[in-house]
Amino acid sequence: MHWADVVAVNLSRRGGKQIISTGITPSGEFHIGHLREILTGEMISRAAIDAGLDVEFIFIVDDADPLRRVYPFLADEYHEFIGHQIGNIPAPDDTGKPDYERFTNDGFSYADYFLNPFLDALRAIGVNPRIVKNLAAYRSGKFTECIKTACDNADKIREIIERVSGRELPSDWFPWSPLDANGSLEGVTVTGYEYPLVHFTDSAGNSGSSDITLGLGKLPWRIDWPAKWAWIGVTCEAFGKDHGASGGSYDTGKEICQLFGYDAPQPLVYEWISLKGKGAMSSSTGNTIGPMEALDLVPPEILRFLIAGSKPNKAIEFDAGMSLVNLADDYERSCARNIAAELDDETLSRRRKVQLEDLMGAVRLSSVGHNSHTDSSNVSFRHLALLAQTKTDDIQVWQSLSMGENNPPSSVLIDRLKKMRTWINSPHFPDEMRIKIIDEVPSELLGELSDDDGLVLANLTRMLNDCKWDVDAIATCIVESAKTIEKSPRIAYTVAYTCLMGTKKGPKLAPIIAELDKPKVIRQFEKCLECLN
RNA sequence: GGGCCUGUAGCUCAGUCAGGUAGAGCGUCGGACUUUUAAUCCGAUGGUCGCGGGUUCGAACCCCGUCGGGCCCGCCA
């Protein structure tokens, strides 16, 4: 059974309405690692819906979190906003400076700046969660009850965190971080609590009081999380392994949640995505592929297939080079199979069955539309890569695939070609896939050619010299050059690939030769002939 | 210090929870196809399941130990 279906089965035991939650702090550029968070949750939702459960999928935006520091992409002006909630400070403009005007006029915040493009990417990938903004939730009183419980039971919560996480909390620790008069959470020390007021002194030594019913502040993370579970009614949440570690925030959250009178959600811990050969993704070092960038290169269903096809506890090494080709072709092949029919075979071993079921689940969860047909393009990624390189005009690509007005390409395929062109022009496109015409043929390759090969090459050179320079004529030359000495056309192709590309096999040759300069091709063949003699 | 994940074919991984002849995909090699879409189809190849013990009629799987890799316990998913 697919991992998402396994979780769905567990949820059906819990019963009732299912709220599957995900959450991210939009403090900087999003990257594909964040997609795993969202997609893992979303796939569980789909599986739960398929299992007949009443399901809602939500995305909690942690915009009540403070700005931690001035990131490299921010101007120095942001120093004054450190400790301020990211949903309540201006977004950076093109130069990294705070855009006060947009913030004042449209309320466009730092959090929105990073969040909005990510939401666009989510839509493109078929994910449409209900958005819950944390800052607004605090301000509208959603947390009030939990904040009161937390403040009333400060000692109990302290005990839980210290015991479960094994770390000691500072003596002035308090389960509510009030905002000071400037709107900062930083440097504020709680000095007393008399419901509904929390008294504090700020970093400058000024004292003040925060009315917890107004939500002007924030619960510390380890309390904030279970409080969200409680007021929203979260029944399932997938989260990164950082929170899942023993003594981590899930463990403490589970107990704190009980104080709020709520049972912790069904957890699912997932591993990180790293960039192949470059280690973990990090926005600050620029070692990152954003979801938008990824979606420019990778069709959404392929990105989904990456997540759906890996068990959550498996680390994923993403790379936009050859692995992407293999992934995409794996998806195409899988779509082309009738896995359900294969499963009917009763002689299948248990292992094989499990494997097929998982694959079927992965394909099912990869379509952008829920329970729609697979998003197969019916053209392999490899093949499309060749067509895109040899034909500059999309129309020619469709023609070569026997598509046209009567048999138009699917929207999936059109999208694939567009992304393929972007990919080819990006540094991620693997050399291996790039069509390259070589100038010097390695002598060891020429040495492997037989006498027959030499004859065919001589024929081919002569015939091409007399030939009209178009695709059909060139194709005929290649075939005839071998046929005239009663050999398979294969020989001619092998020889031509060797002389032009230094390989024995290659993409459809005639269209490529037709794109090349005729004298140059003839000269190259002649050079090879000389070496043979 | 405490804990988590991980080690199975050249590569990516399934199989470990419910012990029962070691599996898939890719790759590689071979064959087919008298125009080659790096295509497609067919076939073959391939592993002391990290290592050492234990339990068992039987262990990749359970138990103990050990080595290697990644990571968390500082709100980086």
Image: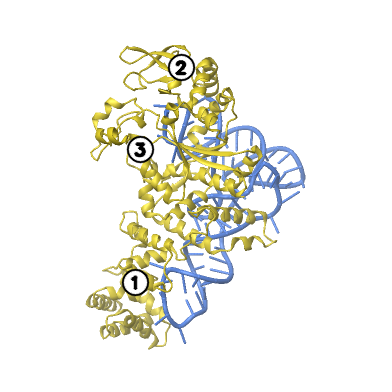
Chain colours: A yellow, B blue
Helix, strand, or loop for circle 1? helix
Nearer to the camera, A84 or A37 = A84
What residue is disc 1 on? Answer: A396
Relative image position of residue A70 (x, y in whole percent): 29, 30
**Which label was assigned to residue A274?**
none
Q: Position of A253 compared to A103: left or right?
A: right
**Which label was assigned to residue A112?**
3
A91 is higher (above) or lower (below) than A172: below
Q: Earlier in the sequence, mark 2 or mark 3?
A: 3
Q: Chain of mark 2?
A: A
Q: Earlier in the sequence, mark 1 or mark 2?
A: 2
Relative image position of residue A424 (x, y in whole percent): 33, 59
Callout 3: 10 Å neighbours few (<14), some, many (20+)? many
Separation of marks 1 and 2 at Cα, in angstroms: 68 Å
Q: Earlier in the sequence, mark 3 or mark 1?
A: 3
Q: Amino acid at mark 2?
A: Phe
